[in-house]
Amino acid sequence: MKQQQQKQHIAIFTTASLPWMTGTAVNPLFRAAYLAKDGQRRVTLVIPWLTLNHQLLVYPNNITFTSPSHHESYVRRWLEDRVSFPLGFEIRFYPAKFATDKRSILPVGDISDAIPDDEADIAVLEEPEHLTWFHHGKKWKTKFNFVIGIVHTNYLAYVKREKQGRLKAFLLKYLNSWVVGIYCHKVIRLSDATQEYPNSIICNVHGVNPKFLEIGLKKLEQQKLQEQAFTKGAYYIGKMVWSKGYKELLKLLKKHQKELAGLEVDLYGSGEDSEEIKEAARKLDLTVNVYPGRDHADPLFHNYKVFLNPSTTDVVCTTTAEALAMGKIVVCADHTSNEFFKQFPNCRVYDDGKGFVRATLKALGEQPSQLTEQQRHELSWEAATQRFVSASDLNRLARADSNLSKRSLFASSSISVGKNLEDMSAYIHFLASGFETSRTAFGAIPGSLQPDEELCKDLGLTLKTPSRNSLKQD
C-alpha cells in the first residue's frame, strides 16, 4: 500500500518572543496560529530562549520564566485570549542571548538544530538577515527543502542615524544581501521601505490582532446608531525612542505651533529616550501629554479619533494597522512603508509640514468613514495568511520524500565546498562565522558560537567542549 503523503511542515523561526511586545514576537505567533488553523499543515514556531539574567534585560515588568515549558505556557495563554479557535501548532526554542548594544536578541549556535533533519521541510525566517548574520552551521537551503525570508525591519534607516551612519549602512546593505542570498530561496518584503533582495517580492503578509477588529465593529455599530463613537482627539503610541517617529512628530509640532494652536496630543510609550522626549514636549507651546506605554487594545484608546504617525523607519507599522482596524483616522507620511494603508479611506497621507497640518485639522473636524466588510477583511490575519500562502507558493510545494539523501550535510562534521558560486560564498561565511575574533569584529555577542552551560542545561542540550580551533570537526 502506498504510504500516505506527509503533511507539509512549516517551521517559523523568529527573533523575539513575548512578553517583549515587538513586531517579531507578535506577528510570527499569529502567523503560526492561522497557518495551522485548518489542520492541513504541521506548523512549528521556533522562538528564542534566554537565561534568567538575559530575560531581566529585555522582558518588561520583571517577567521571567524558570523553564521553556513555563515560557511556552505564557505565550499560549496570551494568544488564547486573542483568538477564538484551538491552537494547533508546536512551540520549540533555540538558544539566544540579548545584545544590549543592539537592543536585540541574537541566536547562539546553529539554531536550525531546533528542527530535526527528518522533519525539515519548509523554513520561514522572520528577519532572515538578523537570524543569519552570525549563523555557523548547516546551510539553511541544504537542510530545508524551501526557505522563505520575511523582511520586517528597515535596518539601513536605523543605522544611518548612528555615528558614521552612511558608511555603516553601505556595509550593512551588502552584508544583508550576502546572507539572505545564501540562505533563502524566496524573500517577502513587507513593503518597499526595505532594501532590495534577489528573488524578492513585496507583499504585506501581516494582519492585526482580532481584538482590534472587534473594537472597530463596536465603533461601527455606534456610528450606525448615530452615537458619538469618538470623544477624544489625537494621539500616538510607540516605543519611546527617537527613531520610532517621535523625532519627526515633535519637529512637526514645533515648526507648526501657530497653525496648530489649541491642538492637544497624547503620547504613549516607554523606552530609553523617554526623559528626553518628555523634555522636548514640555518646551512646546502646544499641549503635548506624555504617558507610559500601554497595550494598544486598552479601553483607554478606544475613544481617540485621530492617530498621528509620522514615522518613516517602519516597514509596515503595526500600530497604524491597529488604529485603522479600530475605525480611527490615521494621519501618516506619504512614504513607501504606508503604501498598503492608502487603500483605506481613513488613511490620510501628507507630503510636507503644511500637508501634515491640513490633514490633522481636517481629520479632527470630521468623523471617520465606516469600514466595509472587505476593508476589515484586508486588515485581518485570515487575509494576511492568504497573501502569505500565495506569495510563498506554499500550495505548490508538496511535502518532499522523507529520504534525506538529496541533502548534503553542510555542518562542522562534514564540510564540502560546492562547485557553484553560492556554495563557495556560503562556505566563506561558514569560515568567517566560525572564529571568535571575526564574529565579534562584525558585532556578534562574545561566546555565542556555541550555547554555554546554562543555556544547555535549560534546553537539555549537550555542552560542546570548546576547542582552540572552532572549526575543528567533531
Image (cartoon, grey):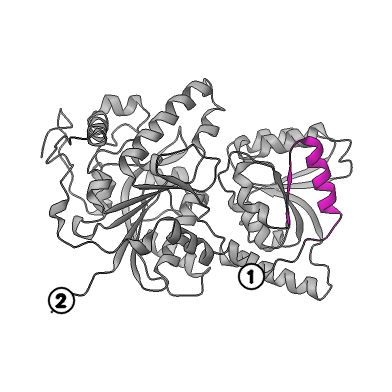
Determine whether the residue tagged by mark 2 lies in a helix, strand or loop. Answer: loop
Determine whether the residue tagged by mark 1 lies in a helix, strand or loop. Answer: helix
State whether residue 391 is above or below residue 410: below
* Dot 1 alpha-carbon crowd within 10 angstroms: few under 14, some 14 to 19, many 20 or more: few
In primary-sequence order, the first of circles 2 and 1 is 2
Residue 135 occupies which quadrant of the picture? top left
* Front-most of residues 63 and 433: 433
The x, y position of residue 364, in whole percent, is 83, 53
Q: Label 1 amino acid?
A: Glu
The residue singled out by tag 2 in the image is 2
The x, y position of residue 406, in whole percent, is 15, 52
The x, y position of residue 92, in whole percent, is 32, 58
| C-beta proximity under 8 Å, tags 2 and 1 | no
Residue 103 as seen in the image, left or right of residue 422: right
Q: Quadrant of the C terminus?
A: top left
Of the two numbered discs 2 and 1 in the rendering, the one whose residue sits closer to the viewer: 2
**Residue 264 in view in this figure:** no
Number of numbered callouts drawn: 2
Distance from the alpha carbon under mark 2 to that under mark 1: 47 Å
The residue singled out by tag 1 in the image is 214
Residue 411 occupies which quadrant of the picture? top left
* Front-most of residues 4 and 20: 4
* Dot 2 alpha-carbon crowd within 10 angstroms: few under 14, some 14 to 19, many 20 or more: few
Residue at 23% x, 71% y is: 5
Q: Is residue 263 magenta?
A: no
* Front-most of residues 201 and 75: 201
Residue 176 occupies which quadrant of the picture? top left
State whether residue 342 is above or below residue 313: below
Residue 49 as seen in the image, left or right of residue 308: left
Residue at 77% x, 63% y is: 369
Stretch of the chain drawn in magenta: 346-368
